[in-house]
Every structure is written in C-alpha cells, then in structure tokens.
Amino acid sequence: MTNARAVAVADAMPDAAKALADRLGAKVMDTDAIINDAGIDAVIIGTPTTTHYDLIQAAAAAGKAIFCEKPIDLSVDRIRDCLEAITAAGVPFMTAFNRRFDPNFAHLQRQIKDQAIGNVELVTILSRDPSPPPLGYIKTSGGIFRDMMIHDFDMARFLLGEDPIELTAVGSCLVDPEIGAAGDFDTAAVMLRTASGKICQISNSRRATYGYDQRIEVHGSMGMLRADNVLETTVELSNSAGMRKAVAQPFFLERYAAAYAAEMAHFVQALETGEAVTPTAQDGLKAQILADAADAAARDGLPKSLPF
Ligand SMILES: NC(=O)c1ccc[n+]([C@@H]2O[C@H](COP(=O)([O-])OP(=O)(O)OC[C@H]3O[C@@H](n4cnc5c(N)ncnc54)[C@H](O)[C@@H]3O)[C@@H](O)[C@H]2O)c1
C-alpha cells in the first residue's frame, strides 16, 4: 500500500493534460510549476526524447526524484550532463527500461541469478515490431539501434550480468525502401561479447506479420531458460488440418501493460523505503553507448570495442 499520489499533470496539449488529470484526480499545471512546487516529491518525464534534457536539469536542480522514459537523450554527451546534474543534486533517478519488469523476463533473470542454469554462456534476444512506425518518426528517432534495440541492449546487460566489451552489427533494409532512403535500417542484428567470454545475439525487425514478437533464450553450463512470446490467448485449436495457436499481442502497450505498472510500483516503493532505484541513469547511458556503437558498426562494417 502506497501513500503516493499523482497530484499534477502537464502536457503541451491542454486537452491531453486534462483528460489524464481527470482520470487521476489530479490538477493540470505547467511543467515549471510542477518542478518548482515544494509539495511535489517526484516527477515522471514521459514527453518526447528531445525535451528530456531540460526537464531533467530543472527537476534535478529543484531536488525532485525523477522517473524518465528511455532514451534519456539521443546524445551520450548530453546524457553525461544529465548524470552530472543528478549526481550533484543527489536525487534518485530511474531510466524507464520497462522490459526488466515484464513478469516473464524478470522471472527469467531471477533464475539466472539463482544459478538455475549455472554460468550464462549464450543469450539470444529477439524483438520484432508488428509494422514500422511512420516515416516522420523514423527521421527523428535516431534509428533502429537507438529507438528500438536500445531496450534489447539494456536487457542484454541485465541478463549477462556484466558489460559487453566488444560489438559487431549488421543492418539491412528489407521491409520498406523509404526507411533506407531516410537513412535507417529496418532489419538489424548485433553480437556482443563480455570480458569473460559470454556471447549475446540480438535481432530486430520492424515487421512481424503475426504481431509483436518478444522472446529470450539463455543457455548456460547447466541448462537453458526460455521466455516465449506472449499470445493474445492461450487457446489452441487442434483439428485434422493441424494445431493453431492465437496471434501474438498487437504491440507494446498490451504486451508490457504489467511491466509498466510494475516499474512505476518499483519507483514509488523505492522512494518510500529508501531502497535503490533501478535501472539507473548509468544503465541509460550504457545502453545509449551500445546503440551508438551498433549504429557505427552497421555502417562501417567494423567491430567496436566498448569503453566500459
Ligand atoms: N518504454 C516504452 O515502452 C516506450 C514506448 C514508447 C515511447 N517511449 C518513450 O516515451 C517518450 C515519449 O514518447 P511518445 O511517443 O509517447 O511521445 P509523444 O510525441 O506522443 O508525446 C507524449 C506527450 O508529451 C506531450 N508533450 C510534448 N512536448 C511537451 C512538452 N515540451 N511539455 C509537456 N508535454 C509535452 C505530448 O503532447 C504528448 O501528450 C519518448 O522518450 C519515447 O522514446 C517509451
């Protein structure tokens, strides 16, 4: 049971602010007023990525705990600036890598920690969107490695339990040539290796005809852990033509509904109990460094050493 309460909502679109405030029983205020309100302890930043930097700086200076959507920023240097501001202010900061809180993935990671499969040797992460985002988004998103695979880079670190030191990447445009013309890839794969030799493979596609596809497999010295994709129902039709399962869930809002609730519950609980907030701003920075390295490697075809 929490004593936390959503007290105010800001949005550049007044109708959107009012609709959410009404649902939460909160007030509509502008961002400056929220950040400077001494009665507010924490802020949730869920605005477009380009707005995060200024909001983080202001919220940190005002001593607020901060929950910020990923990515913190598209520039590693600007993320470092934010880290400095957060550290100087001594405020809790959470980077919203929601997938760590997905019940299946969280359970899988706990099993790794409990040594259920011995030492981790190979991690495989598959992530496919049902269809590409609008071209306008592609042009400003920072590309497939920064807007999509960023989640998988964080998941890779979460499951490997150590930082990768080496990365190779390939990218192709197989879904829509317009994405290629906009300078991005729509199909990509990355390999990571850690100092102790653990290997992680990540593959992304901006198309999956059967719905949102999110799977993980971890192979270890004493066994294997696998988290299958989550389907719309568990009902399977069996007849003389074969056995047919449901399609996958449509997209992230449905697939990660429980994860979004759990990450917010963690943030609130950590603030109330004083426990550490995780994933941290450092986790946000490291995922961004991996995304930058992958983008460069896919473009020049060369392996990258990572500065961790
Ligand atoms: N974790 C996830 O699964 C996930 C999924 C989607 C998006 N995101 C991240 O969430 C963030 C928001 O993405 P989105 O697609 O919802 O963006 P969006 O463009 O839909 O904007 C979200 C809201 O912010 C408002 N807004 C825009 N500029 C503002 C400003 N200066 N001040 C106050 N309000 C402002 C918009 O009116 C809108 O209601 C991005 O950083 C994105 O990367 C995370």
Image: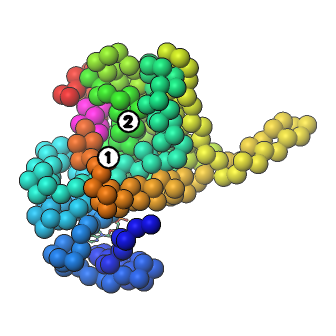
**Residue 78 point in image, percent of width and height:** 14, 49
Q: Residue at x 18, y 57 (%)?
A: 91
Using the rendered view, name the quadrant where residue 89 is placed: bottom left
Relative depth, front residue between 93 and 186 = 93
Which residue position holds label 2? 158
Relative depth, front residue between 276 and 305 = 276
Mark 1 to mark 2: distance in Å? Answer: 9 Å
* Ligand number 1: quarter of image: bottom left
Q: Viewed as shown, does residue 75 lie left or right of 212?
A: left
Q: Residue at x 10, y 64 (%)?
A: 61
Instruction: Point out the image quarter for the C terminus.
Output: top left
Residue type, mark 2 in image: Phe
Q: Residue at x 44, y 19 (%)?
A: 119
Mark 1 vs mark 2: which is more N-terminal? 2
Residue type, mark 1 in image: Pro
Confirm whether the magenta stretch covers residue 22.
no
Instruction: Point out the image quarter for the N terminus.
Output: bottom left
Asked if ligand 1 lies within 8 A of label 1, the reply is no
> What's the magenta region?
287-294
Which residue position holds label 1? 279
Relative depth, front residue between 143 and 175 = 143
**Residue 15 point in image, percent of width and height:** 38, 82
Rendering colour mode: rainbow
The numbered mark at residue 193 is none
Q: Residue furthest left?
A: 88
Q: Secondary structure at mark 1?
A: loop
Confirm whether the magenta stretch covers residue 289.
yes
Q: Is residue 139 visible?
A: no
